[in-house]
Amino acid sequence: MKNLPLLSFLGVVALSAVAAYGAEPAAPAKPVQKITPGKVIVPTDAMRRIWGELVSIDLKTRTGTFRKEGTDELMPFTVLPYAELLHHAAFGDLQDFRIGVRAIFRMHEAEDGQWTWLTYIQDQMNMMNGHKEYFHVDALDAAGGKLTVTQASADLSYVREKGIVLSTDSETKFWKNAQPAKFADIAVGDRLRTETHGVGKGKVQMCWNVFLDDESLLKFQSEQKLLESKRLAEEGASGYVDSSEGGLLELTLFQEGIEISRAAAMGKKVRVASAGVDRKPTGEPLDGTIVAAKMQGNLGKVTVQLGGEAKGFAVSGLARLWLQ
């Protein structure tokens, strides 16, 4: 080996070392997330986000169907208890969504191998507001009630899609400065956001609402937030039962109830009830006191000491909690 160049010699030494001691062990594979009953898990490494048109909802079973946009395919879904239901750029619930609304449906593979489990419905208003995107008006067809637009960031530094056609009809409402406006108030170069619906076939964006400025969309968002806040106060925050022993109850409150989770603190009086698939109480609420509370991301982890035994609360089952 004395005649080998130095680099070759070092390479031979390295190979000899690998042979003697074995290759460097590979890093352990990241566990694949799976939806588990009673746990708040969103498998982001195994999901499909599909634009579609809402066709039906059953509030009792929290199931429904949507038409995959651009096709005639109807896709059934089962809403997981902790699903994010994002309506008018805020949290909502199933009953807030109008049949026909265009939205993104986030789907996961169920136990039977079908992609039917749903962890969010995100309407167009929420998507565009969250991504800070707009429709930039490229052309107007006042007679046909159509707008040709580019979907992009405010300054057009990022362009998602060009040549989108937005349709309007007699039911379309226009908003400017949070007040009623009209199609004629739109000009080439304007930035818009919309709430759209399908028409039962193809890929059509028919507008229910056209927002000519941020102020108008934020008015709708504020109204949705007030509606959801009132609903939480009346119906309680929904969550999973983590454990139930004697009179001690541990809960994970879902993201939609974040304002209640943040307000929960040791010593606060609460009422708690078990809940069914429709997330409605299945029994009379019981009085209790919070003995531990913390935030885990956007989820609330709450421990409640009840006045008596926690009867009727099944581990991994659902519950509702009200702050007194």
Image: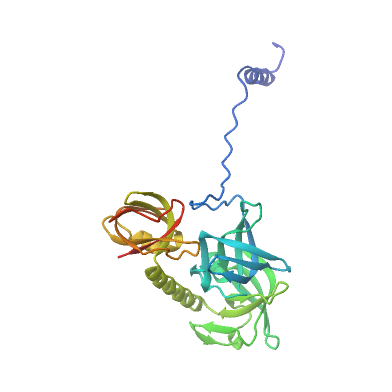
Classify 322 as above or below 139. above
Quarter assignment of residue 108: bottom right
From this viewpoint, which residue is outermost toward the top?
Answer: 2
Classify 194 as above or below 286. below
Quarter assignment of residue 262: bottom left
Residue 30 in the image: x percent, y percent?
57, 40
Q: In this view, does 83 lie to the left or right of 297?
A: right
Residue 312 in the image: x percent, y percent?
40, 56
| Towards the viewer: 88 or 311 | 311
| Towards the viewer: 217 or 282 | 282
Q: In this view, does 230 lie to the left or right of 41?
A: left
Residue at left offset 42%, top offset 64%: 281
* Quadrant of the drawing holding the C terminus: bottom left
Classify 27 as above or below 284. above
* Quadrant of the drawing holding the N terminus: top right
Q: Is residue 160 left or right of residue 85?
A: right
Quarter assignment of residue 71: bottom right
Residue 40 in the image: x percent, y percent?
49, 53
Q: Report whether residue 157 is seen.
A: no
Q: Report whether residue 288 is seen.
A: yes
Classify 181 as above or below 86. below
| Model colouring | rainbow
| Towards the viewer: 24 or 77 | 77
Residue at left offset 38%, top offset 71%: 234
How many numbered marks have been drawn onto this rendered protein structure?
0
Residue at left offset 52%, top offset 72%: 95
| Towards the viewer: 303 or 123 | 303
